[in-house]
Image (cartoon, helix red, strand yellow):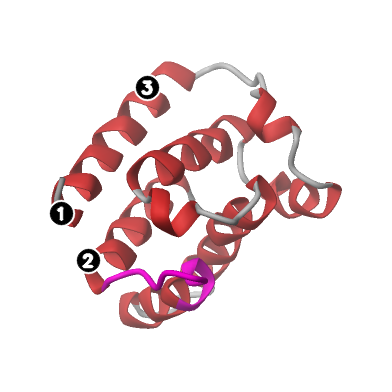
């Protein structure tokens, strides 16, 4: 599967999860296992959206998710939403995503843009 296909699949999964989660405020086990710090940071973001982001991120970007716990992945969403709400340009936000999502494997430009699009839907 190519990276572009993975990004499209992530977006489709994310959209389906958003539609499923509309009107509900239940947390998943994955969201519940996040640390208190991540939970406090994610308090600004609906728990269903945070859970959907976690599932989508892990499914679409398994190499980027490798070695990251739920709290680290949730922080990618919360910090990206903070950048978007602060009015930073798309290029700046994508550059920050590259730094946040990096680790043993760095995201490609396409992956960083796909993560940006996922996060933008959640914010």
Real-space Cα separation, disc 3 to disc 1, in angstroms: 23 Å
- Crowdedness of circle 2 by 10 Å Cα count: few (<14), some, many (20+)? few
Q: Is residue 45 left or right of residue 87?
A: right
Q: Give the quarter of the figure containing the N terminus.
A: top left
Helix, strand, or loop for circle 1? helix
Which circle's residue, 2 or 1, is located before the other in the chain? 1
C-beta proximity under 8 Å, tags 2 and 1:
yes
Front in this rendered view, residue 24 or 97 = 97
Q: Is residue 114 left or right of residue 83?
A: left
104 magenta-colored: yes
Helix, strand, or loop for circle 3? helix
Main SS, magenta residues: loop
Which label sits in the foreground, 2 or 3?
A: 2
Q: Is residue 11 left or right of residue 82?
A: left
Residue shown at 20% from the left, 55% from the top: 3
Front in this rendered view, residue 44 or 100 = 100
Residue indicated by mark 2: 110
Residue indicated by mark 1: 4
Q: Quadrant of residue 8?
A: top left
Q: Report the span colored magenta.
A: 99-108
Residue 64 appears at what percent x and percent y?
Answer: 44, 59
Residue 15 appears at what percent x and percent y?
Answer: 31, 32
Real-space Cα separation, disc 2 to disc 1, in angstroms: 7 Å
Residue shown at 82% from the left, 54% from the top: 37
- Crowdedness of circle 1 by 10 Å Cα count: few (<14), some, many (20+)? few
Residue indicated by mark 3: 19
Which circle's residue, 3 or 1, is located before the other in the chain? 1
Residue 114 appears at what percent x and percent y?
Answer: 28, 57
Residue shown at 40% from the left, 48% from the top: 62
41 magenta-colored: no
Residue shown at 15% from the left, 54% from the top: 4
């Amino acid at each position: 599967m190519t990276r572009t296909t993975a990004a499209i699949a992530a977006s489709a999964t994310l959209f389906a999860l958003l539609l499923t989660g509309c009107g509900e405020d239940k947390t998943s086990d994955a969201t519940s296992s996040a640390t208190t710090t991540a939970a406090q940071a994610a308090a600004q973001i609906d728990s269903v959206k945070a859970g959907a982001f976690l599932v989508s991120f892990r499914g679409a970007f398994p190499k980027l998710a490798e070695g990251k716990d739920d709290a680290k992945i949730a922080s990618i969403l919360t910090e990206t939403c903070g950048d978007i709400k602060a009015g930073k340009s798309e290029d700046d936000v994508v550059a920050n995503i590259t730094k946040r999502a990096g680790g043993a494997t760095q995201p490609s430009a396409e992956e960083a843009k796909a993560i940006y699009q996922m996060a933008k839907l959640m914010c």
